[in-house]
Amino acid sequence: MHSMNKRHLLKTAALSAIALAALAGCGKKEEAAPPAAAPAAAAAPAGDKLKIAFMYVSPIGDGGWTYQHDLGRKAIQERFADKIATSFVESVPESADAERVMRDMAAQGNKLIFATSFGYQEFVQKVAADLPDVKFEHATGYKQAANVATYDTKTFEGAYLAGIVAGGMSKTKTVGVVASVPIPEVVRNINSFVLGAQSVDPAIKAKVVWVNEWFSPPKEAEAATSLINGGVDVLYQNTNSPAVLKTAEERGARAFGKDGDMSAFAPKAHLGSAVIDWTPYYTKVVQDTLGGQWQGGNFWWGVKEGAIDLLKIADDVPQDIKDRVAKARAGLKDGSFAVWTGPVKDNTGKELLTAGQVADDKFLTGINFYVAGVEGKVPGTGGK
Ligand code: GUN
């Protein structure tokens, strides 16, 4: 883990455009690199600019994960307007398509490629091995190479803060999570949400429905519906669209935005949004690359570094719950609090962290169990 930039103000986005685009078609589009904002006297000729490409798994109008990556892209484009030219391809499946898209990006002269979803990992490794003069940045992966860096945000810290709110708001004492792809990152987020809820009310139980995709609004909505029908009154999600929130709005339940500020999609249901800000990291990578100092590595930034925070907590959340969130946030910022501090038991009763024991990164990146109070088993571990 590397130390990093100071807290960066999270930018709130104008959501009307996303709302329109959110559930629209997911066809692949390639955006021509935008021209430099104002051709300053010292601006480099277009051909001398560092070309940077972003590969996205869902549409930029998803309102969440990809929308937020694209805000980061726009921020660096604006900041380094005379030095870089960025472009993106959206809705690229985690399949051989990803390899083709990255080879195409490199053929077009891109020297820095951001691959922004876990399932691109093997394709990044393959393409990077063939193209040593292109640098790759892989979000949420764990395999590095001389020209491959990995990076992620501690989304589990945002999930924990949301969990505190959920614990204070659930009347049925049963919260639910619409889960995407069963990888440790997602399992860690589910558990962290539940740990946050149980920090307020230890009696809280949780149910999980997996949709096995990052972005599928119909499946996300269906999963949310089945959780609500099963007695869940507060929902979290690890999928990319606002479909869970919208379903909660329709059904009179409550839910959170994830990755982006989703408050505009469900004004009544929205309890808060766990928002990622990729801009500090993207700024660092561009600065390092332009300065010839890019070294690769693995970066995992959290609340402390201004990479994630729970924003727009609903007005009807009681003050004592808001105070608990503020306390946890302050502790994450100054390092006096860690989400994964024992005692922590899994849902079979096995103690995995003893009282006061703080999980290290090895533990955190290998989580493949549900904490006590979560129903069922993690897919691939005997569950479904
Ligand atoms: N959405 C699409 N890909 C990812 C990923 O790798 N991690 C998370 N948290 N969300 C995603």
Image: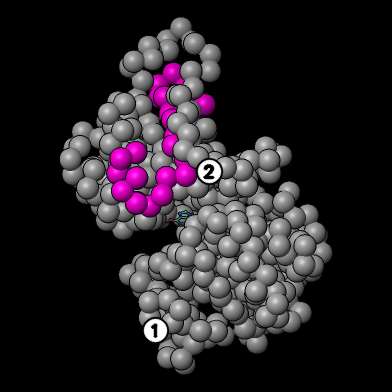
In terms of secondary structure, where does tag 1 sit? loop
- Residue that appears at 38% across and 77% down: 380
Taking the image as shown, residue 262 lies to the left or right of residue 150, namely right
Q: Position of residue 59 (x, y in %)?
A: 53, 43
Residue annotated with mark 2 = 26
- Local secondary structure at mark 2: loop
Please state which of residues 214 and 318 is positioned toward the viewer in this rendering.
214
Quadrant of image for the N terminus: bottom left
Task: Classify mark 1 as within 8 Å of ligand 1 or not, answering yes or no.
Answer: no
Q: Is residue 159 magenta?
A: no
Quarter of the image holding residue 12?
top right
Please name whichever residue, 1 or 246, is drawn nearer the observer in this view of the structure. Answer: 246
Please name the amino acid that badge 1 sits on: Gly
Is there a contact, CB below 8 Å, between mark 1 and mark 2? Answer: no
List the residue tagged with mark 1.
382
Tell me if residue 208 comes above or below residue 185 in the rendering: below
- Please indicate, yes or no, whether residue 339 appears anywhere in the rendered image: no
Determine if the C-beta at disc 2 is less than 8 A from ligand 1: no
Residue 116, position as x, y percentages in the image: 41, 47
Q: Is residue 187 visible?
A: yes
Q: In the figure, 246 relative to 138: above or below?
A: below
Residue at the image position 72 percent from the left and 64 percent from the top? 248
Q: Is residue 271 left or right of residue 139?
A: right
Q: Residue furthest bottom?
A: 349
Q: Which residues are magenta?
A: 78-101
Residue at 74% over, 82% down: 172
